[in-house]
Image (cartoon, rainbow, N blue to C red):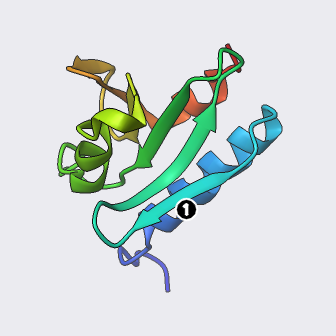
Amino acid sequence: MEGRRDVLYGALYENYVAQELKCRGFPLFYYKSSAKGEIDFLIETDMNRVVPIEVKSGKTYKRHSALSNVLTTENYGIDEALVLCESNIEQSGKITYAPIYCTTFLEKQ
């Protein structure tokens, strides 16, 4: 089996993020709506702000329709979102893109 490239990195990354969030004291929440889609994680900060988190393993990390749907729903009042992926830190509107390992630095603020 050496050299196999069909590993599901998405599942591995999501499990890593779940473990890191739990270790940092965040309860694990997940969002699924037939109209809006699925968000991997939702965290609540100490300032009662909800931050949706998407975990992406591929090069198409900027495609996230569910996250975009949630951010554009005004009555949700979500001001920011985080996409953990294989990229450098980048800001685009309400979304921050950051490397997967940055999960280690999330704090409840």
For the point 34% across and 40% down, which residue is it? Answer: 86
Q: Identify the image quadrant of residue 32.
A: bottom left
Residue lying furthest bottom: 1
Question: Which residue is depicted at the point 49% across and 86% down?
Answer: 1
Task: Classify mark 1: helix, strand or loop.
Answer: helix
The image quarter in which residue 83 lies: top left
Asked whether, in this view, residue 54 is left or right of residue 35, the answer is right
Of residues 44 and 35, the one nearer the viewer is: 35
Q: Position of residue 8 (x, y in %)?
A: 43, 72
The structure residue drawn at horizontal position 54% and vertical position 49%, both measured from the top left corner, is 41
Task: Please state if 29 lies on the left or on the right of 3 as rendered.
Answer: right
From this viewpoint, which residue is outermost toward the front?
75
Q: Which residue is mark 1?
A: 12
Q: Whole-percent x and y of residue 2? A: 48, 79
Residue 18 horizontal/vertical position (percent) = 66, 51
Give the quadrant of the C terminus: top right
- Against 20, is 109 above or below? above
Rendering coords of residue 27 (x, y %) = 76, 45
The image quadrant that residue 80 belongs to is: top left
Total of numbered circles in the picture?
Answer: 1
Residue at (46, 41) in percent of width and height? 53
Q: Amino acid at mark 1?
A: Leu
Decide which of 85, 80 is in the foreground and name it. Answer: 80
Looking at the image, is 50 positioned above or below residue 8? Answer: above
Q: Nearer the viewer, residue 58 or 108?
A: 108
Figure check: 33 above or below 20: below
Crowd tier of the residue under label 1, counting other residues whose Cα lies within 10 Å: few below 14, some 14–19, many 20 or above: few
